[in-house]
């Protein structure tokens, strides 16, 4: 009965989001109530569990989500994204420009939302294609895959941040190993895949179609901009602080409590992101083309819906835990010998394909598998990364990202599917293979 309730709940969630276009926040709350009632939770306890799940999730990652979005908004408004692309291209060279676009996508997507990053950077991809004669489809695939891999895997992006908090993974190791997984996944799905398939999918080349909206956005970003080195430094600063806090705690430990306490403080995810935003405000203020308060207000508005969806995912997870569905899943996995990291990957992949949103797939999957991690003795970091890898691929027409790629690249439906959808799937599978390799060293490598 518990399994039936769980499956009905997931089916209802998909139906609400896909068929009836219900906002994911509303859909997650409604399904949480349905599962709670079906699972035998006392009626009076269901609202308490929903609030408890929402609150605990926001306690864990709410501040980080807000600060990460503000950092991304500052870089987007000042033109830092384009300067990162220019710097990476300069260092890697025009001959390897698809690789440069891929790495640019990985870096830029850490603080900047996928849609905005692609719209800005696709204009650079068009210029590079004209200059180099390299098929434009290679640039689109390399850029799009780089963006989605970082969007789903690398903290402080909201999705992976929510996963790390929900599964109880230590932030330092999660940040480090997410980069270990993200880079090869992005290179294989974005650069290698496009290189091997572009001649088959586009035998006659591809005529670039100019987009007035993309051109207008690029034109609006003209003017003084921060250097690429500064922009990358601002992105890496909070990541390095988190890693520094973890390393210092392990190396110094009780030898110098005061020093350890200091590094632990600045390495806390909330403080690290706060420092990053403060530094970004002072460093980028002179490059802003409108008042700082307007930029921060717009960033805060973007954070609102992310808060709601992420918090509702926490509510969903709390209800799953209270009904005993999580414990039942442990027993099922034991009977069929299904590794938890495989279950997390497959469930995330199915939810991503079914309802479109990578963030919803991440939050929902993490909420489902989190209660079972301790019971089966799995690594929270590896389970979290497997969840993230599952959300990378199979972007279908129910995903807004599919149409962003389609519209701003000028691809047909079939061309978008062959490049973006399959490229993302290859990247997600490649990342999961890396996770499986890491799992062979669980208990040996630090943090696993």
Image (spheres, rainbow, N blue to C red):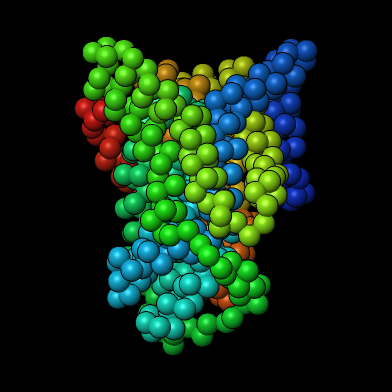
Going 41% across and 67% down the picture, which residue do you hit?
A: 86
Q: In the figure, residue 198 lies in which quadrant?
A: bottom left
Residue toward you, 379 or 19: 379
In the rendered image, residue 111, in percent from the top left (x then y), is placed at: 51, 48
Nearer to me, 208 or 320: 208
Camera-side residue of 312 and 175: 175
Quadrant including the N terminus = top right
Instruction: Give how far across and how far down residue 192 sits, in percent.
Output: 32, 65
Compared across the picture, whether 310 is left or right of 362 comes to: right
Residue drawn at x 31%, y 12% as measured from the top left? 257
| Residue that extends furthest to the bottom in the rendered view of this protein | 204
Residue at image position (47%, 78%) is 127
Q: How many marks?
A: 0
Height in image: 308 above or below 324?
A: below
At 36% from the left and 63% from the top, the residue drawn is: 88
State which quarter of the image contains the C terminus: top left
Observer able to see residue 347: no
Give the x, y percent position of residue 423. Answer: 43, 62
Between 292 and 54, the one lying in front of the other is: 292
Residue 53: quadrant of the picture: top right
Residue 103 visible in rendering? yes
Eyeballing the image, is 416 above or below 186?
Answer: below
Q: Percent x, y for residue 356?
A: 61, 51
In the displayed structure, 446 sits above or below 70; it is above
């Amino acid at each position: 009965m518990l399994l039936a309730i769980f499956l009905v709940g997931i089916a209802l969630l998909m139906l609400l989001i896909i068929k009836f276009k219900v906002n994911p926040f509303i859909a997650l709350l409604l399904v949480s109530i349905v599962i709670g009632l079906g699972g035998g939770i006392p009626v009076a306890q269901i609202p308490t569990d929903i609030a408890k799940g929402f609150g605990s999730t926001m306690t864990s990652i709410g501040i980080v989500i807000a600060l990460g979005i503000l950092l991304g908004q500052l870089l987007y408004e000042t033109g830092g994204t384009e300067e990162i692309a220019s710097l990476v291209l300069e260092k890697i060279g025009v001959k390897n420009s698809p690789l440069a676009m891929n790495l640019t996508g990985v870096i830029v997507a850490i603080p900047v939302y996928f849609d905005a990053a692609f719209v800005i950077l696709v204009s650079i991809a068009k210029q590079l294609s004209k200059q180099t004669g390299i098929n434009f489809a290679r640039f689109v695939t390399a850029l799009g895959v780089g963006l989605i891999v970082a969007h789903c895997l690398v903290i402080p992006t909201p999705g992976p941040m929510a996963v790390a908090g929900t599964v109880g993974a230590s932030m330092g190791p999660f940040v480090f190993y997410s980069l270990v997984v993200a880079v090869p996944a992005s290179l294989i799905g974005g650069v290698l895949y496009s290189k091997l398939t572009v001649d088959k999918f586009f035998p006659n080349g591809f005529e670039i179609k100019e987009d007035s909206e993309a051109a207008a956005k690029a034109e609006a970003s003209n003017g003084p901009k921060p250097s690429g080195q500064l922009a990358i430094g601002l992105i890496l600063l909070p990541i390095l602080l988190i890693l520094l806090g973890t390393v210092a705690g392990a190396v110094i430990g009780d030898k110098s409590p005061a020093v350890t306490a200091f590094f632990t403080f600045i390495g806390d995810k909330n403080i690290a992101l706060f420092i990053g935003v403060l530094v970004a405000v002072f460093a980028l203020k002179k490059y802003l083309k409108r008042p700082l308060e307007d930029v921060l207000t717009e960033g805060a508005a973007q954070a609102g819906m992310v808060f709601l969806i992420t918090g509702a995912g926490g509510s969903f997870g709390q209800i799953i835990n209270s009904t005993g569905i999580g414990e039942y899943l442990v027993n099922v996995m034991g009977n069929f010998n299904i590794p938890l990291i495989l279950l997390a990957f497959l469930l995330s992949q199915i939810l991503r394909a079914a309802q479109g949103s990578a963030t919803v797939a991440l939050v929902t999957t993490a909420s489902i598998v989190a209660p079972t991690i301790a019971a089966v003795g799995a690594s929270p970091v590896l389970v979290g990364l497997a969840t993230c890898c599952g959300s990378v691929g199979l972007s279908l027409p129910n995903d807004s990202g599919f149409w962003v790629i389609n519209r701003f690249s000028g691809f047909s439906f079939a061309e978008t599917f062959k490049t973006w959808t399959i490229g993302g799937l290859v990247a997600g599978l490649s990342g999961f293979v890396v996770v499986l390799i890491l799992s062979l060293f669980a208990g040996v490598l630090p943090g696993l």
